[in-house]
Image: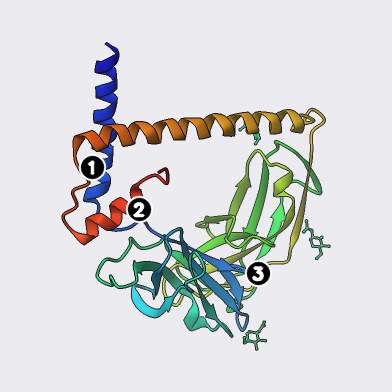
Amino acid sequence: MIPELLSLLCFRLCVGQGDLRRDESPPKPSLSAWPSSVAPARSNVTLRCSTPTKDVNFVLRKGGKVLELLQSPDSTEGQAEFHLTDLKSINAGEYTCEYYRKGHPHISSQPSDVLQLLVTGYFSKPSLQAHQRGVVTEGAEVTLQCQRPDTEIVAVMFALLKAGTPMPVQRRSPAGKETDFSLQNVSIGDTGNYSCVYYQTRAPFLASRPSDHLAIRVTGSPRTTASDYTTGNLIRLGLAAAALVIAGAFLLEACCSQESPRGVRSPEGRWVLEQARPAVS
Ligand SMILES: *[C@@H]1O[C@H](CO)[C@@H](O)[C@H](O)[C@H]1NC(C)=O
Ligand SMILES: *[C@@H]1O[C@H](CO)[C@@H](O)[C@H](O)[C@H]1NC(C)=O
Ligand SMILES: *[C@@H]1O[C@H](CO)[C@@H](O)[C@H](O)[C@H]1NC(C)=O
């Protein structure tokens, strides 16, 4: 009974690993913008492409076309920064990045998720209003209404921005000239200054000036005083998870080393396999 269960488990694990070997593209990197992906004209923005893999070269694309190639410095993790200075409308658009291992330019990773860079200041500002005023209690729902002035702009979306947050908090298509953003079950972390913009969903991706800031302050409800208890639980949970991962790594090693030598047919396959193996030796 037990051996049967074990071999079934082994089978499942090794089949899972087989899928990984067949997939030849290394996993996608992440692309982020600093200080924000919604930035005023003439400001500077840094796009950062990063992956846990070292010794890679990066490719930045805009609208699918290669824009720039960069090497990551040898000393650091796989990370590259693309500096866009003195932003203009032409910089707005949809960016992705990918990487390849140095010396293997024909094996590109999957592309990152699309990052939409919006350059603001091209249309007059919308107004942002909260249905609730002033201070909000934790757990409540807050509705923020963004309304654009009467302008003839086709294909617009609205984005809700929070000061200090590099990506829009929410995006919504409007009903007429306005849209309602809903923040549900708010927590202390939702405290901050919010604004909204409207923007074109197609090239040239121009965005309005941001609305005036609207301050939202979320206060705790009286019953949340259990932070020590939570920390203790998190530590226990972390230890349990670590033990599980180690046990799983040993099991995988035992199962899969019996089944086949690490026969690797292509350089692509070897690359993926090296990446996929757990860091336990
Ligand atoms: C943008 O970067 C350029 C060159 O690095 C610098 O001269 C300029 O002051 C920066 N502009 C802003 C608004 O920070
Ligand atoms: C609201 O958020 C808190 C903490 O994030 C969570 O424990 C709770 O279950 C949430 N409540 C609802 C109704 O989603
Ligand atoms: C919101 O903006 C005001 C004025 O700029 C500032 O004093 C305040 O600290 C900001 N609040 C938060 C939570 O960032």
Q: Is residue 55 left or right of residue 226?
A: left
Report the residue at 50% width, 57% height from top: 173
Residue 278, horizontal then vertical, whole percent: 39, 44
Q: Cβ–Cβ below 8 Å for labels 3 and 1?
A: no
Look at 32% across and 53% down and name the residue there: 274
**Of circles 3 and 1, which is in front?**
1
> What's the distance in space between the residues labelled 3 and 1, CA to CA?
50 Å
Which residue is under mark 1?
18
Q: Nearer the viewer, residue 274 or 31?
A: 274
Label 1 vs 2, first from the N-terminus: 1
Residue located beneath label 3 in the image: 210
- Looking at the picture, tell me which residue is in the foreground, 27 or 163: 27
Which of pointers 3 and 2 indicates the residue nearer the eye? Answer: 2
**Quarter, ligand 3:** bottom right
Residue type at mark 2? Gln
Mark 2: which secondary structure? Answer: helix
Residue identifier under label 2: 275
Q: Position of residue 234 (x, y in %)?
A: 64, 33
In the rendered image, the quadrant that contains the C terminus is: top left
Report the Cα–Cα distance between label 1 and label 2. Answer: 14 Å
Side (left or right) of 205 relative to 4: right
| Vertical comparison of 175 with 251: above or below | below
Element under disc 1: helix
* Three-letter amino acid code at the position of disc 3: Pro
Q: Is residue 22 shown left or right of residue 215?
A: left
- Position of residue 162 measured from the top left corner of the image (x, y, whole percent): 67, 59
Q: Is residue 134 above or below residue 77?
A: above
Give me the residue at 33% from left, 60% from top.
110
Which residue is found at the position 20% from the left and 43% from the top?
Answer: 261
Mark nearer the N terminus (3 vs 2): 3
Q: Which amino acid type is shown beneath numbered disc 1?
A: Gly
